[in-house]
């Protein structure tokens, strides 16, 4: 066993990668600090003694992105980290799905793998680095683990694939965000989103990922050679051949039960065989030994059932009688809940999803905060898996890691087809409630989510469907399965979910339990998935052939305008007074999108939305010379009339501009409350406005104004006052309110 601090480094994809141990968490079985660029992640692993009293592997994976890693303080009242974020949970799943199948069969010691970000440089994301650190910590800890693992992220930027892209490339420029883990012999876990990549492009990306992983594995093995601890003593439990032989005698009955049509009926038939098998096994066993024998027999029966179903599949028969590439019957009910903005009941075989799409305003965007730069999401999908969907009862609580993972997979599948904010300014939330489940509920959520958005009037670029695929392989025998059942997922060697349009893949998730899946096999599997996806898309388009031309009558109406940037403060008002009044008066929600003056108005009543739009335009408009307005006379003076041309904005119409002829008294032409049309004839540098009614009137016959002699004004009340103004009647309210002028 190596002692003290051990550190090694290499260059991968042009970046410095460092692994070190021996300084921190020295009482853990394995502890590693991994550095990529200037991003650092710590991971520690501890394993308890094997337990014989449980029939499962108690593995716990935890990952946290602590805000001090990016020089931030957590928000909220308590100012400390709370429940894990979605990003943290998804990273935990990436680690868990990679390592769980790699622990030696039969090992049941409690294992905890914990990691967190120490430092984030804003360039290299810490999630994949946490995977690398965790895998290395397991290996140097000497746990009973089958393979050295590593991980990589692949992007597709400027027409080329690259490993370990920057966060800026991943978010903005890349057509692909692919995370892969694997060992020397093959890939074991895949998670990706893509912008309609072809199957060939995706295979090329997986090839690059595996070749990079092999480089990293050599590096990790070197690290293990210098810092690895002795292997933990563990002897896998011996197989009870007598028990296996006895239960193996029920293979025929199990095979017959598995051919029962209907999930519920099939499970009941298998349970009946299991009960008969237990009775046979326990016959003649002493009472004090029955509990232990029954527990062992249940485990063996489960394994025998797995063997039987796998053999049936490899022989060409599936539990529900379908061919390997056959898709279950699909039924679609659009607008299942009429008052929802968009809703669909999507059923494929015995898997059913009730999916809704709700349209909101920019204020409904989700704020994502963590070690990365804060950003907003205007699209998110939530997936719920209630216990009644599988005919069970269980403790109810918040969404679990599985629900968050399945929801994010469906969200990634649909993100790439959404319209831009400039075309469709709504925030979109999709909720998928799984009401029945027998395999592939996440892909039902993809199909239902796409259809719900189409029903809601979201102008998506392409319809997207999802399909869950499976692989069963035994030596030279293999079977690729389309639209797998829950038992086929559980008993297979690989399950992968593919979502995409007719043009290409938008999301891919794989869990591979066997060593060595060839490129040729992946190509065949993805091609079979493509054909299945096209079949499902056709069924979807039969039900809803295109997005609705208008959003639902129950959805908010939207209007977008642009106001002068200097008027944003006026629109908001002191303490938000003006904008709150608008929202109350017109029953709308007003959102200021940016500092450039782009404003959106949302409301359920189209007339009120448009009226609010007109009001905002009017109150924030800057009148220019030549503009014409229909205004209301607000006050009359001996030298002219003040006309409100916009809400809160008045212009002076001098007596000489009221009509073509001589006007002796202003009230001969206009009075307070009259509505008249005027034209702006001057706007001075202080914002004072002069208007003319005369300019809007037809010229008098003869083309000249009246020639009546104009009497002198003894008090110089007209023209002279028009030149300077003595401030006697002048008022000007701040913040863009009403203006009054005299001369």
Image (tube, helix red, strand yellow):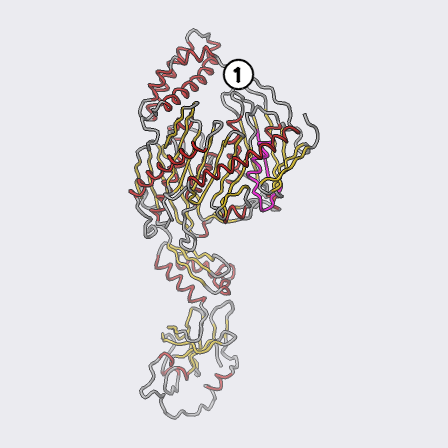
Identify the residue at image location x=32%, y=43%: 337
Q: Nearer the viewer, residue 704 or 338?
A: 704
Residue at (41%, 20%) from the top-left corner?
307
Q: Residue at x 43, y 63 (%)?
A: 616
Q: Quadrant of residue 718?
A: bottom left
- The residue furthest left is 542
- Marks counted in the figure total 1
Percent across and percent down for residue 678 are 39, 76
- SS at circle 1: loop
Which quadrant is the N terminus positioned in?
top right
- Relative to residue 12, is residue 375 depicted above or below? below
| In the depicted structure, whether residue 456 falls above or below residue 185 | below
Viewer-nearest residue: 607 or 422: 422
Residue drawn at (37%, 75%), measured in percent from left and top?
A: 677
What is the magenta range?
112-136
Magenta span includes 352: no
Is residue 90 visible in the rendered structure shown here? no
Instruction: Provide the residue designation for mark 1.
Output: 237
Q: Quick one: label 1, few (<14), some, or many (20+) residues within 10 Å?
A: few
Q: Quadrant of the rendered structure where residue 82 is? A: top right
Q: Is residue 119 magenta?
A: yes
The picture places residue 529, in percent across and down from the top left corner, at 38, 35
Residue 336 visible somewhere in the drawing: yes
Residue farthest toward the front in the current orientation of the protein: 520
| Residue 548: percent from left, percent from top | 32, 50
Pinpoint residue 368: horizontal percent, then vertical percent.
51, 46
């Amino acid at each position: 066993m190596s002692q003290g601090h051990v550190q090694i480094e290499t260059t991968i994809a042009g970046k410095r990668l460092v692994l070190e141990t021996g300084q921190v968490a020295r009482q853990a079985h394995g502890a590693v600090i991994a550095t990529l660029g200037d991003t650092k992640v710590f991971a520690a692993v501890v394993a308890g003694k094997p337990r014989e009293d449980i029939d499962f592997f108690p593995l716990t994976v935890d990952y946290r992105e602590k805000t001090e890693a990016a020089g931030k303080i957590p928000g909220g009242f308590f100012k400390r980290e709370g429940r894990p974020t979605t990003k943290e949970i998804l990273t935990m799943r990436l680690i868990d799905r990679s390592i769980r199948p790699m622990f030696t069969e039969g090992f049941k010691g409690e294992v905890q793998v914990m990691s967190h970000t120490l430092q984030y440089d804003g360039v290299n994301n810490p999630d994949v680095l946490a995977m690398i650190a965790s895998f290395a910590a397991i290996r140097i800890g000497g746990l009973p683990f089958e393979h050295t693992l590593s991980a990589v992220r692949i992007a597709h930027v400027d027409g080329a694939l690259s490993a370990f892209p920057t966060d800026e490339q991943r978010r903005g420029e890349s057509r692909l965000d692919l995370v892969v883990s694997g060992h020397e012999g093959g890939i074991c876990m895949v998670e990706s989103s893509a912008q309609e990549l072809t199957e060939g492009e995706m295979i090329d990306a997986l090839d690059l990922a595996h070749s990079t992983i092999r480089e990293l594995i050599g590096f990790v093995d070197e690290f293990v050679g210098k810092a690895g601890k002795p292997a933990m003593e563990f002897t896998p439990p011996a197989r009870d051949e007598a028990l296996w032989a006895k239960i193996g005698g029920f293979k025929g009955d199990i095979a017959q039960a598995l051919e029962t049509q209907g999930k519920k009926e099939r499970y009941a038939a298998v349970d009946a065989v299991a009960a008969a098998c237990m009775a046979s096994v326990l016959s003649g066993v002493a009472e004090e030994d029955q509990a232990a024998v029954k527990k062992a027999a249940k485990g063996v029966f489960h394994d025998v059932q797995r063997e039987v179903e796998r053999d049936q599949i490899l022989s060409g028969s599936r539990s529900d009688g379908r061919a390997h590439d056959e898709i279950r019957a699909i039924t679609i009910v659009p607008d299942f809940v009429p008052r929802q903005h968009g809703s669909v009941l999507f059923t494929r075989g015995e898997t059913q999803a009730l999916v809704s799409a709700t349209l909101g305003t920019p204020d409904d965007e989700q704020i994502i905060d963590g070690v990365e730069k804060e950003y907003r999401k205007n699209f998110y999908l939530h997936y719920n898996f209630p216990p009644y969907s599988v005919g069970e009862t269980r403790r109810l609580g918040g969404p679990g890691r599985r629900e968050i993972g399945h929801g994010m997979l469906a969200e990634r599948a649909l993100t790439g087809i959404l319209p831009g904010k400039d075309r469709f300014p709504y925030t979109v939330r999709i909720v998928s409630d799984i009401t029945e489940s027998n395999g592939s509920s996440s892909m039902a959520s993809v199909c239902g989510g796409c259809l719900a958005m189409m029903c809601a009037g979201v102008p998506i670029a392409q319809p997207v469907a999802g399909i869950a695929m499976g692989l069963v392989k035994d030596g030279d025998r293999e079977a690729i399965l389309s639209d797998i059942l829950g038992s086929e997922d559980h008993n297979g060697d690989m399950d992968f979910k593919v979502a995409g349009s007719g043009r290409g893949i938008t999301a891919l998730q794989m869990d591979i339990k066997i060593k060595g899946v060839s490129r040729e096999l992946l190509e065949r599997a993805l091609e079979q998935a493509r054909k299945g996806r096209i079949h499902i898309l056709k069924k979807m388009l039969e039900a809803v052939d295109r997005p609705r031309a208008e959003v639902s009558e129950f959805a908010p109406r939207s209007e977008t305008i642009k106001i002068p940037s200097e008027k944003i403060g006026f629109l908001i008002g002191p303490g938000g007074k003006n904008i709150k009044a608008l929202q109350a008066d017109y029953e709308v929600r007003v959102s200021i999108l940016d500092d450039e003056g782009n404003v959106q108005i949302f409301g359920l009543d189209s007339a009120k939305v448009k009226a609010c739009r007109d009001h905002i335009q009017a109150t924030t408009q800057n009148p220019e010379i030549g503009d014409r307005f229909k205004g209301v006379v607000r006050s009359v003076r001996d030298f002219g009339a003040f006309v409100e041309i916009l809400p809160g904005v008045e212009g002076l119409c001098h007596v000489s501009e009221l009509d073509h002829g001589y006007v002796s008294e202003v009230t001969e032409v206009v009075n307070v409350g009259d509505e008249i049309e005027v034209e702006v004839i001057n706007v001075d540098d202080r914002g004072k406005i002069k208007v003319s009614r005369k300019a809007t009137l037809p010229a008098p016959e003869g083309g000249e104004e009246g020639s009546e002699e104009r009497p002198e004004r003894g008090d110089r009340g007209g023209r002279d006052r028009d030149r300077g103004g003595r401030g006697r009647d002048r008022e000007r309210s701040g913040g863009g309110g009403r203006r009054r002028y005299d001369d």
